[in-house]
Image (tube, rainbow, N blue to C red):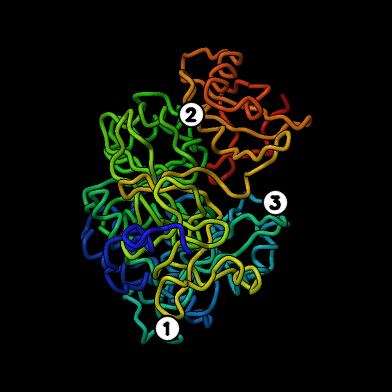
Amino acid sequence: MGVLGVVERGLLVPVRGRAGVGVRLLPEILAGGVGLGGGGVAVSCGGVELSYGELDEWSNRWARVLIGRGVGPGVVVGVGVSRSVELVVAVWAVVKSGAAFVPVDPGLPEVRVRELLVDSGAVVGLSVSGVVLPSVVEWLRVDDPGVVVGVSGVGVSDGDRVRRLWVGDAAYVMYTSGSSGRPKGVVVTHGGLANLVEEVRVRFGLWSGCRVSHVASPSFDASVYEWLMAFSVGARLVVAPPGVFGGAALGEWLAVEGVTHCFVTPSVLATVESGALGSVRVLVVAGEVLGPELVARWAPGRELFDAYGPTEVTVQATVSGALVAGGVVTVGGPAVGVEVVVLDGWLRPVPVGVVGELYVGGAGLARGYLGRAGLTAGSFVANPFGVVGSRLYRTGDLVRWDGLGSLVFVGRADFQVKVRGQRVELGEVESVLVRCPGVVAAAVVVGEGGGLVGYVVPEVGVRVDPGVVVEFAGSVLPGGVVPSVVVVLGELPVTASGKLDRAALPAP
């Protein structure tokens, strides 16, 4: 017997977002943006600007160069360019050729770059002058005008490509960390891109007059999110300089550039001073747990959304409505074309209020992990609640329904640890710490002695006493799971993707 009644099962198994809008291939989405953008600026970085017409023509020429080398659907091309106008040109060129792009951060160690290129099977790479990358592939420099002299800038169609582009072809390969230390290449097809574009356009009120920030690392799929928010509606993508990731520098840059729509992780948002986002009308936060302190600080004066989505589901699976200070923080319900179900350890749907693991289905599911059939089979499982042959992605994230159609994020299933024999969800402890007055961000790890160690970041200008934080946690949590030590930091260390870097937390 299942744990749900008939009525509740009908409501929760599965929960579906708005109906999908059909298929649009990524080159078609970009072409639509060119039409909507007209003569407006497509991308700017510092003092460099490209109109939609200029970007279209430049990338068409490079797409034809790639096609002339046999590049097309089913092939992977490395893109070794930092955030810049040239990065956008390179990505557009690969997309128009029909191939899949794999972003490679030039700042990574040479050994890691080599591993990614070999693992992805990239046949050629696009970069810029002055960047030295492993010679696993031949690198073409998109800022070298001599390569495209005499090459047509006319739009590229299936008739120009080496073969027709299909919805099931790979659009990009994005590498995520693996538990074994070996990165996993997630192969994302064109299947869910149109739904993603429709969701962000409607929910975030995007149009050609918007200015969308590009702050994410190109090797983090939030960069795809930023690109599509801008290019799908003909808006301007404003590229942050390489040294701008957070703090005062990010706040100042957003204000100077007049950015209206911005994506950040909670760890990065916690580093920005209050009042620094004056021009930002829509703020989208994802990648980590968003605490109520950050909502109280940033929701007034703009629309603040909490989005959720692993790389394996084409960037975004769920998204909240506009959050309000003092309200419950949720990651909302399923986005356009997405279906979700919350299951217990026996793969049974759970009732409202009960914590379970989130499974995601829909057209946006990735093909799987490149060259890793076993890992793919373990993460992308048969969907017993859908049509025959459909799949669900097992996220490893713990959530619960709030009774109003939204999901509350609880934590990672693999962040469960045992402290003095008691099972503890680290995310739950962290969520309590950020509720302590004056705390805007927190992290919890298991210390050398087996107890929990908390790390907290205070609000700007606020002094936080570690003893007070411990006392506050003790008023909410069972004694056995209260951090025995709390360390106050100016900011939490983050990875290149803007997420918490637990390995870089200092010893207490």
Q: Nearer the viewer, residue 228 or 130?
A: 228
* Crowd around label 1: few <14 · some 14–19 · many ≥20 (10 Å): many
Between 285 and 445, the residue placed more toward the observer is 445
Residue with the mark numbered 3? 109
Q: Amino acid at mark 2?
A: Thr
- Tell me the SS state at disc 2: loop
State yes or no: discs 1 and 3 in contact (Cβ < 8 Å).
no
Provide the secondary structure element on which disc 1 rests. loop
Q: Which residue is mark 2?
A: 271
Amino acid type, mark 1: Arg
Residue 183 shows in the view? yes
Which residue is located at x 58 percent, y 53 percent? 105
Residue 161 - label: 1
Residue 142: x and y in percent read 49, 63
- Which of the two discs, 1 and 3, labels the residue nearer the N terminus? 3
Query: Pointer 3: residues within 10 angstroms few (<14), some, or many (20+)?
Result: few
Task: Give the Cα separation between the discs numbered 1 and 3.
Answer: 34 Å
Q: Is residue 148 visible?
A: no
The disc, 2 or 3, on the residue closer to the chain's N-terminal end is 3
For image coordinates 27% across by 53% down, the residue present is: 235
Name the one closer to the observer, 142 or 341: 341
Q: Are marks 1 and 2 in contact (CB under 8 Å)?
A: no
Q: Residue 213's quadrant in the figure? A: top left
For residue 264, above or below residue 206: above
Residue 11 in the image: x percent, y percent?
32, 59
Depth check, mark 1 against mark 2: the one in front is 2
Identify the residue at horizontal 45%, vertical 57% (top origin).
Answer: 3
Q: Amino acid at mark 3?
A: Pro
Separation (CA) of disc 1 from disc 2: 46 Å
For marks 1 and 2 on the same chain, the one whose residue lies earlier in the sequence: 1
Label number found at residue 125: none
Determine the CA span between mark 2 and mark 3. 27 Å
